[in-house]
């Protein structure tokens, strides 16, 4: 799989390239700003882009805007936004034009290489990945209806919102896939959500319920 | 007619005579003033003050509003004569105080104006006592016809002096004093700037103090948290490398710990950065950042943001902190169903008000009470006062609760 990186910090760009290269990705280009990035995406036609939020010249949210723009030009183009900090409003803006192939993660997450690479692959395959911190911001906001859930069900809900499938949830919580299935059923029942399969539509339903 | 003349003449003569005697007595001490004035800056500033009083008297006599005072003598070191004589305020006060020298003719007019009529009346009656030695209009009087001719003439002349000449002279004098002592536009500007510098020096000292306290807090946080974490991280990696050959399993375990430590350090560092200057403020400005906060609140928030203009970064950070902390408090403790947040510019200040319809009873405590309340408000007060702002809390039992904050922006 071919990837374009948008990251102005050479240390992080190099580390990210090393990490992706070691996991079987081909780094097609590393861009330092939004204009370079747009050119690189058009030229190399990558399978996914990994994008930092803060970039020159203003060091505010250029990366976010570059990601949204890239997805406007090529609808469904997988983008993983990778940031020093996360804000719920940024997640909402990123997902506004469709959540397929969108990821939003803290840079901290690279320390768990397996999980990080799994997230990159999920985004490249058209899935949604949300950082646990965004999800916890969302869960605080919706604390009222979520009171009806047991602690375990809340954990399952959070992992669903992060974009994980049943198998990954089971591994993460160290329980059987059958148990996950049961919890998921309960969550949907208690929140009055229409039952959906474990695919992308489920993530959408959960995020919609959380108000994103 | 007569009272009108008196009403015009008397103040004019009084003004001239009093000014003259004031001037003469000052003239008498002038050598002393100059003798010591070069040595003591206090004496020169006294001189400038006296000149300003002279100007006030002139304005009072003319019935005009007072002019702005001369700026006080520029500060100088004792004995610095060059600075003294370069000081325009000082030079001009000396000129005005030397005025009595040219005032002698004016004084003559005033005395004549006052004395002419009484002396004419007296001479007209008393001349037979010593014929030839009483004068009317400078003519020796030795017969009644002279007395009756020149007496009224002198009375008329005296009234003329009193009613017209003296007021004219006094007015000219007062206007000259005012003109002499009116500070030039440049001088006024210099004085205004000097005052502004003084004020800025004072406020800046306060700002530097609170800035220093903030820097120390950040230094402590980074030193005790992040830096210590990184040291421990480096140690663990070193130990893991040593253990790798003999006990790979142990090395892997230590590396896991190291990774946990790195994650913790990143989280803590993010926390420190957030308290310094929340990143979203840099990205979206105060209005955007506060609206993101309100969107995140579980309780519905109605946010009204006015035109904010340019707001210093420290004020933005404090305002953001107050809103964030208030919304956290409200969510945790107030049982409110609705929150109002208002943010607007009021002249040189930023005004912020957060009102909730909850149960009230909020208090500012240094330490949290048994329900975990109060310390958040204390932190807010601290943060607001650090940048010279004011915070007011109104929270009667039963609610509603309002936090009002005013932060200076200039």
Image (spheres, rainbow, N blue to C red):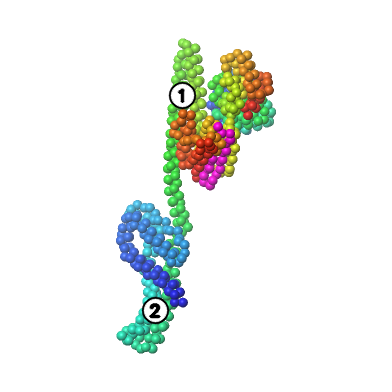
Marks 2 and 1 belong to one chain: yes
The image shows residue B253 at horizontal and vertical percentages of: 49, 15
Q: Is residue A55 visible?
A: no
The image shows residue B261 at horizontal and vertical percentages of: 48, 22
- Please give the chain letter of the residue carrying mark 1: B
Disc 2 secondary structure class:
helix
Disc 1 secondary structure class:
helix
Instruction: Identify the residue position indicated by label 1 in the image.
Output: B229
- Please give the chain letter of the residue carrying mark 2: B
Q: Is residue B343 magenta?
A: yes
Q: CA distance from mark 2 to mark 1?
A: 102 Å
Is residue B15 placed above or below A119 in the rendered structure?
below
Q: Residue furthest front?
A: B398
The image shows residue B384 at horizontal and vertical percentages of: 48, 39
The image shows residue B264 at horizontal and vertical percentages of: 50, 24
Query: Pointer 1: residues within 10 angstroms few (<14), some, or many (20+)?
Result: many
Going from N to C along the chain, the mark reached first, 2 or 1, is: 2
Q: Which mark is residue B374?
A: none
Instruction: Identify the residue position indicated by label 2 in the image.
Output: B117
Q: Is residue B307 magenta?
A: no
Q: Residue at x 53, y 36 (%)?
A: B398
Query: Pointer 2: residues within 10 angstroms few (<14), some, or many (20+)?
Result: many
Is residue A97 placed above or below B309 in the rendered structure?
above
CB-based contact (under 8 Å), mark 2 and mark 1: no
Q: Residue at x 33, y 84 (%)?
A: B126
Is residue B197 placed above or below B241 in the rendered structure?
below
Residue A51 sits in which quadrant? top right
Residue A142 sits in which quadrant? top right
Q: Is residue B148 visible?
A: yes
Q: Nearer the viewer, residue B399 or B82?
A: B399
For the record, the magenta segment spans: B335-354
């Amino acid at each position: 799989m071919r990837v374009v990186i948008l990251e102005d910090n050479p240390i992080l760009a190099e580390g990210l390239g090393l990490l992706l290269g070691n996991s079987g990705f081909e780094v097609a280009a590393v861009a330092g700003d939004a204009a370079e990035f747009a050119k690189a995406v058009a030229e190399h036609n990558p399978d996914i882009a990994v994008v930092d939020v803060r970039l020159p010249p203003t060091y505010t949210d250029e990366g976010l805007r570059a990601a949204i723009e890239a997805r406007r030009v090529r609808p469904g183009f997988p983008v993983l936004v990778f940031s020093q900090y996360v804000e719920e409003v940024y997640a909402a803006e990123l997902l506004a034009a469709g959540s397929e192939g969108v990821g939003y993660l803290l840079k901290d997450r690279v320390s768990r290489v397996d999980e990080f690479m799994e997230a990159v692959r999920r985004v490249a395959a058209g899935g949604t990945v949300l950082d646990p911190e965004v999800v916890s911001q969302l869960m605080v906001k919706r604390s009222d209806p979520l009171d009806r859930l047991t602690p375990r069900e809340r954990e399952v809900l959070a992992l669903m919102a992060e974009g994980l499938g049943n198998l990954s949830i089971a591994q993460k919580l160290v329980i059987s896939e059958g148990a996950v299935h049961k919890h998921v059923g309960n969550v949907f029942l208690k929140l009055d959500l229409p039952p959906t399969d474990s695919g992308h539509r489920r993530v959408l339903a959960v995020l919609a319920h959380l108000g994103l | 007619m007569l009272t009108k003349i008196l009403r015009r003449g008397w103040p004019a003569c009084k003004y001239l005579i009093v000014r003259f005697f004031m001037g003469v007595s000052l003239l008498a001490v002038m050598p002393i003033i100059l003798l010591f004035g070069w040595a003591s800056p206090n004496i020169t500033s006294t001189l400038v003050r006296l000149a300003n009083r002279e100007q006030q008297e002139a304005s009072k006599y003319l019935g005009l509003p007072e002019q702005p005072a001369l700026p006080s003598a520029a500060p100088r070191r004792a004995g610095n004569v060059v600075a003294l004589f370069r000081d325009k305020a000082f030079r001009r006060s000396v000129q005005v105080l030397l005025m009595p020298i040219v005032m002698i003719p004016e004084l003559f007019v005033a005395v004549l104006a006052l004395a002419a009529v009484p002396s004419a009346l007296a001479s007209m009656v008393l001349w037979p006592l010593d014929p030839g030695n009483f004068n009317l209009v400078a003519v020796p009087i030795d017969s009644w016809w002279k007395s009756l001719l020149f007496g009224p003439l002198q009375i008329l002349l005296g009234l003329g002096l009193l009613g017209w000449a003296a007021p004219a002279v006094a007015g000219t004098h007062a206007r000259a004093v005012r003109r002499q002592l009116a500070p030039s536009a440049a001088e006024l500007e210099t004085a205004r700037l000097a005052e502004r510098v003084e004020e800025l020096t004072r406020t800046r000292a306060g700002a530097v103090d609170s800035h220093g306290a903030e820097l120390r807090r950040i230094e402590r946080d980074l030193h005790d948290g992040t830096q210590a974490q990184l040291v421990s991280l480096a140690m663990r990696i070193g130990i893991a490398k040593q253990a790798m050959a003999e006990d790979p399993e142990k090395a892997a375990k230590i590396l896991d710990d190291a990774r946990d430590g790195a994650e913790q350090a990143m989280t803590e560092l993010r926390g420190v950065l957030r308290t310094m200057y929340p990143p979203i403020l840099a990205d979206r400005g105060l209005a955007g950042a506060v609206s993101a906060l309100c969107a995140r609140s579980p309780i519905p928030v109605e946010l009204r943001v006015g035109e904010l203009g340019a707001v210093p970064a420290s004020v933005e950070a404090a305002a953001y902190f107050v809103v964030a902390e208030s919304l956290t408090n409200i969510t945790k403790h107030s049982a409110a169903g609705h929150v109002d947040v208002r943010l607007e510019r009021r002249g040189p200040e930023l005004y912020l008000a957060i009102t909730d319809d909850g149960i009230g009873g909020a208090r500012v405590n240094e330490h949290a009470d048994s329900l975990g309340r109060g310390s958040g408000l204390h932190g807010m007060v601290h943060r607001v006062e650090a940048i010279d702002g004011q915070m007011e809390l109104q929270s009667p039992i039963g609610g509603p609760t309002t936090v009002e904050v005013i932060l200076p922006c200039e």
